[in-house]
Image (cartoon, rainbow, N blue to C red):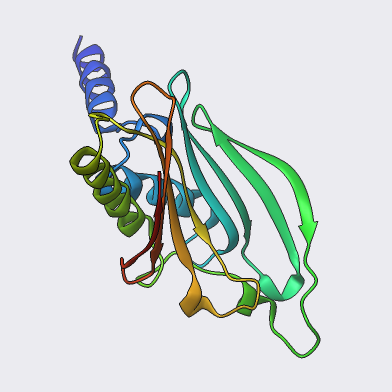
Amino acid sequence: MKTFKSIALLAVIMVMSCGKGASKQTANAKGFTAIETEIKSKFGDNAYYTELTISYNKSIGNSISVIATESPESLKMGEWYLTLDTWKQNSEITLEVPQGSKASEFMFQLDDNINLTQLGELVEKSSDLIKAESSSENPTLYMAYIKLPKNGDLSKTEYIVLLNSEDGENTYTFIYKLNDQLIQMDY
């Protein structure tokens, strides 16, 4: 009986300690922080990326697409998708970089300069702008991603946020600098 109680208590603790998976996270700073934690648990804290996109679909929740490597100098990267909280590698990619350049100059890491918490904050900010300027009362995330410049100048990296109107008829696009400054807004 004592063993049964111990097992039951352990099961309850495990269930309570489990958070929502990445697919069920909300499109805000807290939710995107949890998504970043999921990505780092898969690829490590020191991974490099050339693409990172979070998409939302009402029927399946969030999907994540990344092109990542732990070793930029190898020029080998993997294209991965997370759907319904399951990671699947879609392909392997070999990079070509200009002669005399380092591959890492054309990649980013999730750190203080580029992070998903900030991208989640910008999703919230964009949603508030739509609510203030249009009749759409409950815009939803369509896609949010990090856009690297082709020339490798990481200071020109942009956060892109696309939101759909509640009825799905309109898509709103917001482009931000890394310092949260709005560059462009398109309704």
Spot occupied by residue 182 in the image (x, y as percentages of width and height): 33, 63
Q: Is residue 10 above or below residue 149?
A: above
Q: Nearer the viewer, residue 138 or 68?
A: 138
Relative placement, left or right, of 72 versus 11 is right
Which residue is located at x 70 percent, y 53 percent?
78
Q: Residue furthest top?
A: 1
- Going by the image, does 42 lie left or right of 77? left
Q: Is residue 5 left or right of residue 105?
A: left
Q: Nearer the viewer, residue 160 or 41?
A: 160
Going 32% across and 72% down the picture, which residue do you hit? Answer: 179
Quadrant where the C terminus lies? top left
Relative to 148, is 119 above or below? Answer: above
Residue closest to the far bottom:
100
Q: Position of residue 96 (x, y in %)?
A: 80, 71
Q: Residue at x 28, y 21 (%)?
A: 11
Total numbered labels: 0
Q: Considering only vertical position in the picture, is 172 above or below 3?
A: below
Q: Quadrant of the N terminus?
A: top left
Provide residue 43's location: percent of width, then percent of height: 54, 55
Left or right: where does residue 106 sit relative to residue 119? right
Q: Residue at x 31, y 66 (%)?
A: 180
